[in-house]
Amino acid sequence: MNKPSAPELDSPVQAGLSPARLMRLEAAMQRQIDAGHVPGVTMAISRRGKLAYAKSLGALRPGGPRMRPDGIFRIYSMTKPIISTALMMLVEEGRVFISEPLSKFLSEFADVKVGVESGGKLKLVEAERPITLHDLLRHTSGLTYAFTGDSLVQKRYAKATLFGTSADSAALASALARLPLIAQPGTRWDYGHSTDVLGRVIEVITGQTLGTHLREKVFNPLGMHDTGFFAPEASHDRLAEPFDKDPDTGAPVVLIETRVEPRLEAGGGGLVSTINDYLRFMHLFYNGGALDGVRLLGRRTVTHMISDHLDSDIPVNRNLLLLPGHGFGLGFAVRLATGMAPSAGSVGEYFWGGIAGTSFWIAPQEELAAIMLIQVAPSQRDYYRQLFRNLVYAALM
């Protein structure tokens, strides 16, 4: 199969973007680079399925060469929509239902317990129903992250050995199954390790490692040849890096190792990618599941994934990216209201980001897709996401 061609470059004006206001975007990012807050950034905007704007500013890494459009970035949780896509492709093959219990594939989850705080102590109670694959896809499994709060359950996560040097996806899933859930399955949205476990489910169903399966079924068909769980030696000169210390706090910045093949292929956040590769994945969804004659998902499956899957009676732990006015689909946050959120947007927009600052969104009403790749300290990520989003929407004519 020939590599699918890149979307045709359209001019900003033809695409309905103001050149003067795009200059504001560039100037704002350049100010951050000149002030020493970030080494560099690469950005792209498409309208109506065509690339309309692309710009790389600053350096690929501190003291290194200039930023380049084929720079390779840790995308962290932007891995999650890709894993969700791979699972839904298996649904379309008739190999799995999202309504099925997780324990059908990973038996260690058959007897999970839920942690209930009482009087400063943690009581473990039985789960009222099994975790389903649907729960994993929409983050209602009860699995959490240690860094998103300070509950007694999350303190147990912090003390657990989840990412030892010998850990693989099977070991990680087994370790998570031994920890208490933060809430009853299906009763609360709480961002956590759900997609890591989903990656392990894909391995069990397919009999392949997650990296091999993604490469054969997603990356190669879409021409995403720079995306994977590490960057091979020939690509090391294109790796983007952050400053060693957070420019605002002085705290050390430690990101995942990307130069050697990892034992753990983490479905929740282990991929590296380039802006052109991830744009191809975005255009797959923008086009309803097909790109350049390659169809990975049916149109109605895409609609299912980018629709809100949180019932009105499911409370949301509104940390990180799931801001007011938003729900969550199968791998993506979904905008439900034009207002309420701190940044402009339109109903039906879907998106996600990574802890090192990477961010993307697709807005069907605006015929818009935008992506920013950057490597910053986790504490800086929200600033750059809001800056990018505000200035992209301001550039629409």
Image: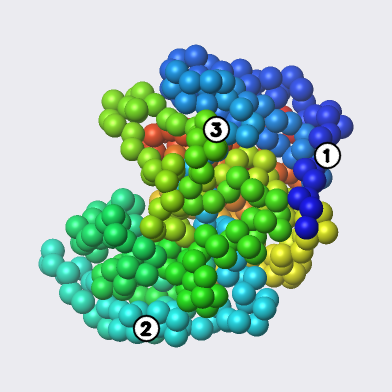
CA distance separating discs 1 and 2? 48 Å
Q: Which label sits in the foreground, 3 or 1?
A: 3
Judge the density around disc 1: few (<14), some (14-19), many (≥20) Cα neighbours within 10 Å: few
* Marked residue nearer the N-terminal end (3 or 1): 1
Q: Give the crowd class for mark 2: few <14, some 14-19, many >=20 residues within 10 Å.
A: few
Question: Can you name the residue that lies furthest to the front here?
Answer: 234
| Mark with earlier residue (3, 2) | 2
Task: Say which of marks 3 and 2 sits in front.
Answer: 3
- Location of mark 2 (residue): 107
Q: Residue furthest top?
A: 34
The image quarter containing residue 284 is bottom right
* Mark 3 vs mark 2, CA separation in Å: 41 Å
What secondary structure is marked by label 1?
loop
Q: Quadrant of residue 43?
A: top right
- Left/right of residue 66 with respect to residue 18 in the rendered view: left
Q: Which quadrant: the N terminus?
A: bottom right
Kindly identify the residue that appears in the image at 28 percent across and 30 percent down. Answer: 251
Nearer the observer, 43 or 31: 43
Q: Which residue is mark 3?
A: 238
Residue 78 located left or right of residue 4: left
Amino acid at dot 2: Ser
The percent position of residue 209, horizontal first and vertical second, equals 49, 66
Secondary structure beneath label 3: helix
What residue is disc 1 on?
Answer: 8
Q: Name the residue located 40 percent from the left edge and 53 percent from the top edge.
A: 262
Dot 3 surroundings within 10 Å: few (below 14), some, or many (20 or more)?
some
The answer to whether residue 203 is left or right of residue 300 is left
* Residue 203 visible to the viewer: yes
In the picture, measured across the screen, residue 249 lies left or right of residue 326, that is left
- Say which label, 1 or 2, has the lower sequence index: 1
Label 2 residue SS = helix
- Is 134 located above or below residue 389 in the figure? below
